[in-house]
Image (cartoon, rainbow, N blue to C red):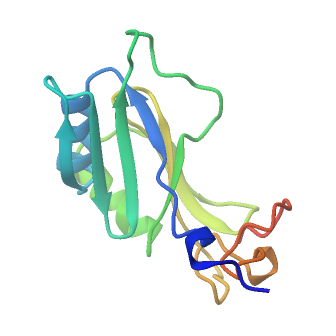
Amino acid sequence: MSAPAAGRMLRAMPVLQVRDVKASEAFYCDVLGFASHGTWGAPPVFAIVQRGHVTIALDQSRDGSAPPRQQYWSAYLYVADADAMLAEVQRSGVSVARDIETSDYGCRDFDIRDPDGHILGIGHVIAPGPMGPGLDAGSLGRDGEGGSGKRGGLA
């Protein structure tokens, strides 16, 4: 059964808490090659950046607290070629937090930190399935677009 068009999920956008929206926007645009979709507020308290199909929101801490670190990766960015992306990142002078390696979960990836300490995993799937990186036809939900509610399905 197909979900109604209004219920179809289209994509996700991680929202990272940052101390300084303009500084973070500059890092993502100038260092990682994202384009800015603009900032909101005066001074800016929110921004959206995008590179290819990857979109990230940058949200300034409302109470001045440091960005939370409840997990290892704040975002994982799938790229076509992790080795080429690593070379691009290194040319920009970004420090690599974890060197590139082929993982036991089927990706070739490395990690960097953004100016707020968020760890970004960057990698490519070694043998992507027909759905593309990070997706597996076995993880499709009721709308045929993913989201079965079950664990697994990452490729």
Residue 72 image offset from top left, x and y in percent: 63, 36
Residue extending farthest left = 42
Which residue is pictured at 33% across the width and 20% down the height?
A: 19
Residue 105 image offset from top left, x and y in percent: 74, 63
Which residue is pictured at 44% across the width and 75% down the height?
A: 80
Q: In the image, 5: left or right of 93?
A: right
Q: Nearer the viewer, residue 70 or 47?
A: 47
Residue extending farthest bottom = 130
Q: In the image, 56: left or right of 124?
A: left
The N terminus - image quarter: bottom right
Residue extending farthest right = 150
**Residue 97 visible here:** no
Q: Nearer the viewer, residue 143 or 129?
A: 143
Which residue is pictured at 78% across the width and 73% down the height?
A: 139
Number of labels in the image equals: 0
Residue 100 image offset from top left, x and y in percent: 53, 55
Q: Nearer the viewer, residue 69 or 119?
A: 69
